[in-house]
Image (cartoon, rainbow, N blue to C red):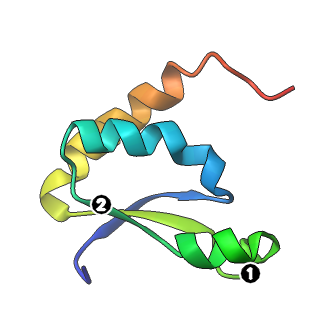
Amino acid sequence: MEHYKTIAIFTFQNEYAVLRLLLDHEEVRYIFLNETMIGVLPFHSNAVGGIRLKVHPEDVEIALQILNRWNDSSHLKIV
């Protein structure tokens, strides 16, 4: 996993719940780093650098496409 590339950083787990399903559907090899720690201590998210989405080098291109589609098609906004 040392060669995995960070392509996104999130503050809380709820921010990427749908993205995780999209990555699984496309069989992208990924890991969310610091996910467990921030799940237990959510207010320490900024202190540890957030939850990092790390993707296998061979899957970076497809993961970025999924991430861009997900960002562009999100019509739900928190008010």
Residue type at tag 1:
Ala
Numbered disc total? 2
Circle 1 or circle 2, nearest the eye: 2
The residue positioned 67% from the left and 20% from the top of the image is 76
The residue positioned 30% from the left and 34% from the top of the image is 65
Residue behind mark 2: 30
The image shows residue 73 at horizontal and vertical percentages of 50, 18
Image vertical order of residue 27 relative to residue 52, above or below:
above
Residue behind mark 1: 47
Tell me the quadrant of the picture where the C terminus can be found: top right
Q: Residues within 10 Å of mark 1 (few under 14, many from 20)?
A: few
The residue positioned 21% from the left and 38% from the top of the image is 26
- Along the horizontal axis of the image, is 21 left or right of 71? left
Q: Secondary structure at mark 1?
A: loop
Tell me the quadrant of the picture where the N terminus can be found: bottom left
Q: Quadrant of residue 50?
A: bottom right
